[in-house]
Image (cartoon, rainbow, N blue to C red):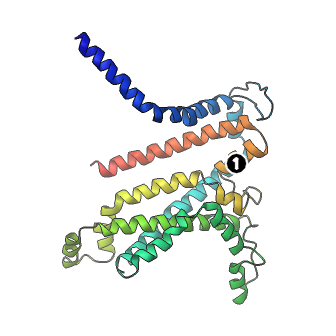
Amino acid sequence: MSGLTSRSIKDNLWSFALLLPILIPLVVFWIYPMVSTFHISFTDWNYISPEFNYVGLENYKDFIGDSFFIKVLINTLVFTTFTVVPPIILGLYVAILLSKIKALRTFFVATIFSSWITPTIVVSMVWVSVFDKDTGIINAILEVVGIAPVEWLGGQTSSMIVVIVVTVWRYLGLSILLLTSSLAKLDPEVEKANDLDGGKGLRKLTKITLPAISPMLLFLFILFTLDSLKAYDQIYILTQGGPSGATSTIMYYFYVLAFEWYETGPASALAIIFLVICLLISSINYIISKLLFNK
């Protein structure tokens, strides 16, 4: 018995040793920073001074009555809502069209997918020139049809529209690629049987297509939601969170607090709040996926 116990201990130690290359980066780059951020969130540290004071829950309480924080939450909700659903719907529409085209299908998909793999900063810089008031192609087209130039990146509403359009365009490439792949895996016999039964158009979409690709739709929904929540690059390049905070989201507000205003304590508290929001959304998505696919 002692021999078996000794062998079991050795096996466990060996397994643990094999896991160390994975556990060490996990602890160093994720667990430790998270614990450290949680600790700093209860202080008034300003990122520069080596000294700080503990303020308890004050940093968290300040956000409750902060009108700008409420505005940031609303911006984040609006931005996430309009950057998650449209690329999935448009991606499905384009994927259905591409599924009917065999010639050059791969070329079209590869070209469209480039919007996802191109760095966000590069994409955003291109779109800045597109929406420029004086030299942008959008205003040039508007002038042709007799419409005055629009300050796209300087308006309260138009700036958010631009950020949403750029993000949707970026997501669309991945959405089309994955949905085209999912549609290609549909059972052709089931589709033929449905066609013989008179199931075409909307009925075919709701009865055959959507149920078959629902796991991919859920995956895209979760992916785009989490990516939209942490959006920063395009907002920084396009609008810098302005005008007057019209395009500031939680992640951009965190950046401003931490690295422009050097309010590291409140920024850490905001990071913890953001983590809780992401965990809640992930939990809701998990519950929905269990209800949909474990019946």
Give coordinates of residue 111: x percent, y percent.
49, 73
Does the image show residue 131?
A: no
Examine the image and state in which quarter residue 209 appears.
bottom left
Left or right, 174 with respect to 134, comes to left
Q: Which quarter of the rendering shows the N terminus?
A: top left
Give how far across and how far down residue 48 sits, in percent.
79, 34
Residue density around tag 1, few if under 14, some if 14–19, many if 20 or more, within 10 Å: many
Residue under the image location 73 percent in, 64 percent down: 156
State the residue position of label 1: 253
Instruction: Examine the rendered structure and indicate whether residue 80 appears above or below residue 5.
Output: below
**Front-most of residues 201 and 117:** 117
Q: Please tell me in which quadrant of the rendered image residue 36 appears.
A: top right
In terms of secondary structure, where does tag 1 sit? helix
**Residue farthest top in this picture:** 2
Foreground residue among 232 and 113 = 113
Q: Is residue 151 visible?
A: yes
Figure check: 165 above or below 35: below
How many tags in the picture? 1
Residue type, mark 1 in image:
Tyr
The one of 56 and 140 positioned closer to us in this rendering: 140
The residue located at (67%, 59%) in the rendering is: 235
